[in-house]
Image (spheres, grey):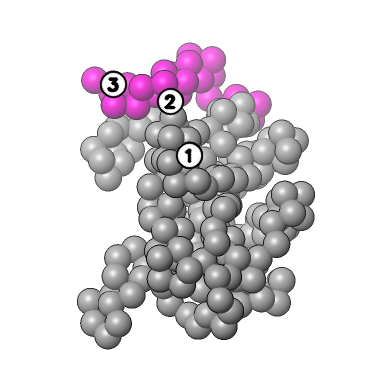
Amino acid sequence: MLGQMKNIAQLLVEQNVVQTNFENPFTWTSGIKSPVYCDCRELISIPEARDIIVEAFLELMERENLKCDYIAGPATAGIPWAAIIADRLKIPMLYVRSKPKGHGAGKMVEGKVFTQNPNIVVVEDAFSTGGSSIKSAEALRTEVGAMVTHIMGIFSWSTPQSITNAEEADITLAPLTEFHAIVKALIDSGKIDQTQKESLERFHDNPSQWGV
């Protein structure tokens, strides 16, 4: 598993999906200033990288014995991965809106459910606090009576909050790679130096205070 995390981290760094900027940091939706940004959405436009990610997801499912009736993807970033994986496995797919539809049945889950209490694996692109991904799992549980135990993702920021949120929701977050593997890949590729590595680690330990 550690070897796979390293390889996926290297892939993200090599494809410039991971960017760093210590002078003009990126701004998160929360307002936090971050010296690193990982845009996994770019991977859907890179066929060779996309294939590697899909194979890694399938290997993860086999390794963890994740048997499921459906694959579900949260809107919008999880949808393309869910679609590809569902097609490869020849099983139905659902997607989950970020908020209830403002008309019609007002539901979050889209697609047709043919079985009672289906076993569903959710696939996401990235986890920060895990909140939005877990919200999708909860919608599946509530609206279609799904059994959801795992949410797969390409990348995790490995925040303490994501661990807490997952435990409270009785969910396992299963990323292909995570923050510390990314930092090592950045160092190994020569894209950051030791001082910048330490800065990234300080950011991870206390994001809200890093840029203060």
Residue annotated with mark 3: 209
Report the amino acid beneath label 3: Gln
Q: Residue 194 versus residue 66: which sits nearer the camera?
A: 66
Residue in the image at 41% along x and 21% along y: 205
Answer left or right for 119 relative to 111. Answer: right
- Magenta region: 187-212
Q: Nearer the viewer, mark 1 or mark 2?
A: 1
CA distance separating discs 2 and 3: 10 Å
Q: Quadrant of residue 141?
A: bottom left
Q: Image quadrant for the N terminus?
A: top right
Q: Which residue: 51% across, 40% down?
A: 156
Q: Main secondary structure of the magenta part?
A: helix
Question: Please, what secondary structure does the residue beneath circle 1 have?
Answer: helix
Q: Residues within 10 Å of mark 2 (few under 14, many from 20)?
A: some
Q: In this view of the protein, which residue sits in the foreground, 27 or 130?
A: 130
| Nearest to viewer (mark 1 / mark 3) | 1
Residue behind mark 1: 167
Q: Earlier in the sequence, mark 2 or mark 3?
A: 2
Q: What kind of residue is marked 2?
A: His
Q: Is residue 166 left or right of residue 58?
A: left
Graded by Cα atoms within 10 Å as few (under 14), some (14 to 19) or many (20 or more), the crowding at tag 3 reads few
Q: Name the residue that disc number 2 marks.
A: 204
Eyeballing the image, is 32 above or below 200? below
Q: Residue at x 55, y 45 (%)?
A: 173
How would you rate the neighbour count of disc 1 (Cα within 10 Å): few for under 14, some for 14-19, many for 20 or more? few
Q: Say whether residue 196 is magenta.
A: yes
Q: Is residue 76 visible?
A: no
Against 69, residue 28 (above or below) is above
Lower position in the chain sequence, tag 1 or tag 3 = 1
